[in-house]
Amino acid sequence: MSKNRQYYLDWIRVLAFGILIFYHAGMFFVPWEFHFKNNEIVDGIKYPMLFFNQWRLSLLFFISGVGISFALKSRTGLQFIRERNKRLLIPLLFGMLVIVPPQIYCERVISHQFVGSYLDFMSNLRLRTYPRGDISWHHLWFVIYLWVYSAVGLPIFLALKSPKGQRFLQKLYRIFLHPFKIYWLTIPFMLLFWSLDKISPTTHNLTHDWLNLLNSFLLVLLGYVLGQNTDFWAMLETHRKTYLWASIIFGACLYLFIHYPFFPIVNDDLEFFAEGIITRINAFSVILCIGGYAKHYLNYTNKFLVYANEAVYPFYILHQTILLIIGFYIVNLSWAWEVKLLIMMAGTFIGALLIYHFLIRPFNLMRVLFGVKRKQTN
């Protein structure tokens, strides 16, 4: 292990992806749109789900940007794109052909759009894009978005890597690397929200998803710019309690004034304006808070982290398919929703662990298909 490796970034990545299992299991029970729903909708789960919903994807894209900054330290632009192709495009194509179709099959059967076995479904696969057809990336939208950001953003990343770009970044750091001035960086995200939220709902289809597309790219760019600066992480560590309080205060405002308002804002335009401010500052504060506490408490490694850091990407690729297959078999059972939730979370984790440990980890071909580096031979 490298003595210079910043292990807290690995911990953040593992924990951020780990939240997905809880979050997507919860989506089975809340009234929000999902692939299919439990026979009992549980309104109360929305409250903790909203807490994670504000920042979970923002954190993932930010950390991905940090990862790009480290990847480009030891690679040329061409080497970087080759690595992105192997790590992102190959798992995406494999996922769309092998991992995602069982999800679509479960959806079609539950919604009475298809009757028959999975073999029948695959034999009659409609080679059109979802939802009219059966070709989709579903939860793997994150992978294709990250590949697009890597390709489109590469000229920017390389320009900022140059001596002139580094001088520009030093000027930027002098302005924004301050515990409070850093919040000025939330303004572009607010402007995007106010401009696009009402006209660009999230679709994850890459072509008609402008708010999500641009917002996530800005987060990757921000992660690239800030993540390579050691003073940034030191600042987060020093002021981690400040960012914790900011997260608590703005998170509370989100519930009190916007989502389930105890103090409703009667003017719709004013509420929309306030939502842009509160949601963006809240998400940014949580990212800063998590970064600060991880830097302080999690800058170490152990056997679990080594294993989990390699396993987390295959877990991500596998988790939603396993989750929906479990949901398919228990959706109409009269069990308590708490039991179903626990079964889905535990079953997804155990299923992904078994598949990774016994079918992916030992074999180089499977490792490549799931975006994991080949095992080194002696």
Image (cartoon, rainbow, N blue to C red):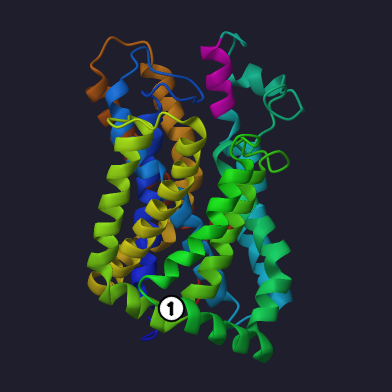
Q: Amino acid at mark 1?
A: Leu
The part of the image, by quadrant, that contains residue 231 is bottom left
Which x, y percent locates residue 140? 57, 43
Does 75 appear above or below 141? Answer: below
Q: Indicate whether residue 126 is drawn in magenta.
A: no
The part of the image, by quadrant, that contains residue 115 is top right
- Residue at screen point 27% across, 30% down: 262
Which x, y percent locates residue 89? 67, 54
Which x, y percent locates residue 219? 54, 60
Q: Is residue 62 visible?
A: yes
The N terminus lies in quadrant:
bottom left
Q: Is residue 369 visible?
A: no
Does 100 appear above or below 81? Answer: above
Q: Secondary structure at mark 1?
A: loop
- Residue at screen point 29% across, 28% down: 45
Does 19 appear above or below 88? Answer: above
Span of residues in magenta: 103-111
Of 113 and 30, the residue lying toward us: 30
Residue on which disc 1 sits: 177
Q: Indicate whether residue 105 is drawn in magenta.
A: yes
Of 288 and 193, the residue lying toward us: 193
Magenta residues, dominant SS class = helix
Which x, y percent locates residue 18? 36, 49
- In this figure, what is the number of numbered marks? 1
- Taking the view exactly as shown, the residue that stands out farthest to the right is 127
